[in-house]
Amino acid sequence: MSLASAGHPLASPGAQLRIINQPSLAQRPFDQALAESGLFPLTATGITVLQINVGKLCNQTCRHCHVDAGPDRREIMSRETAQQCIRALERTDIPTVDITGGAPELNPNFRWLVERAKALGRHVTDRCNLTVLRVPSQADLAEFLARNHVEVIASLPYFQEAETDAQRGDGVFSKSIEALRTLNGLGYGNPSNGLRLNLVHNPVGAFLPPSQASIEADFKRELYRRHRVVFNSLYTITNMPISRFLEYLLRSGNYERYMEKLVNAYNPAAAAGVMCRYMLSVGWDGTLYDCDFNQMLELPLGHGAPGHIRDFSKDWLDRRRIATGQHCYGCTAGAGSSCVGAVA
């Protein structure tokens, strides 16, 4: 049973944020670490990625999911909000549109968003859980992605079945391998044709990710040797102490130890390159956030920034002050963590 289903006071994002921000649970406040690094206040450097979270509906219920997504979620971006995202893009030269969820492909407006963004000449990435490609209603999804030259960023916790299924559910690994083979069959992962297929690894447990370069080599070797699967790059992402992973940390008694590990591994170079400085996150209802993690904590843009995609102003948002909290140690520990992996 989850904390949410039990009615636990930590179930709400606001309560999670209050718990995480207790100073007794970390050596120093995150803003203090920024100040000591000469980075406070943290500000944006210009938007190059518009990340659109189209909702929490998903065909999986993963134990580490920071979105708390699942088959029973009903938060889904409407066509009206999707149109507002496209209108914002029309007024800018933001080069990349990053579509995420949930399983973003299950949103009925996903393909419309892809086609409209591509028509504007933007690079589109799809954050795919792979098993959605095996859903009967998505039988032509892989062909759609390839036809529109969508970059696929696919979550695969590990190259072995036991570790992946432990985190994502029984049978997920085998379905993921089938999906990867389908994508390979369409040309994804071949460095010569531009159809990029990148995998995402996050640790199974309360650990920091290993060296991105070394584990990428392991993934490439083992996936090809065992399954004849190829891909372009591997991104390592730190598990953020929010939502379901926070519940796991609290239940297992690992919360304080994990937070101390993140705080002690703070890296100023990683903090300087955090994704929130060049990314803007749009929630399923159009609310604007500095990143997807702030979105899940219901920590919207502050300091006078526009609050909704309908009020989008790139000049203002390009130089906004970023809302931070103790969870930001997750993106600044070690080599750093972002939606495209290590940053330092």
Image (cartoon, grey):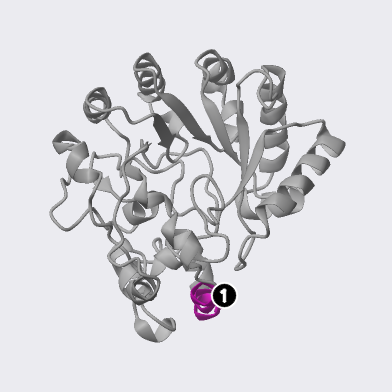
For residue 118, side relative to residue 306 (left or right): right
Residue 16 vs residue 95, the one in the foreground? 95
> Which residue is outermost to the bottom?
24
Which residue in the protein does label 1 denote? 252
Q: Residue at x 56, y 30 (%)?
A: 152
| Neighbours of disc 1 within 10 Å: few (<14), some (14-19), many (20+) | few
Q: Residue at x 33, y 72 (%)?
A: 31
In magenta stretch: residue 183: no
In magenta stretch: residue 258: yes
Report the amino acid beneath label 1: Ser
> Which residue is outermost to the front?
38
Q: Which image quadrant: the C terminus?
A: bottom right
- Label 1: which secondary element: helix
For residue 260, side relative to residue 112 (left or right): right
Find residue 165 and report its horizontal and vertical position in percent.
68, 50
For residue 18, side relative to residue 1 (left or right): left
Residue 150 vs residue 248, the one in the foreground? 150
Find residue 183 and report its horizontal and vertical position in percent.
66, 24
Looking at the rendering, the stretch of residues picked out in magenta corresponds to 253-264
Find residue 233 and report its horizontal and vertical position in percent.
65, 39
Q: Residue at x 55, y 59 (%)?
A: 238
Give the answer, above or below, for where 215 lies relative to 309: below
Q: Quadrant of residue 100?
A: top left
Q: Is residue 1 visible from the viewing direction of this image?
A: no
Q: Is residue 22 visible from the viewing direction of this image?
A: yes
Q: How many numbered marks does the figure carry? A: 1
Q: Quadrant of residue 143?
A: top right
Give the answer, above or below, for where 247 lies relative to 108: below
Find residue 33 and report its horizontal and vertical position in percent.
39, 74
Instruction: Label the magenta part by its dominant secondary structure.
Output: helix
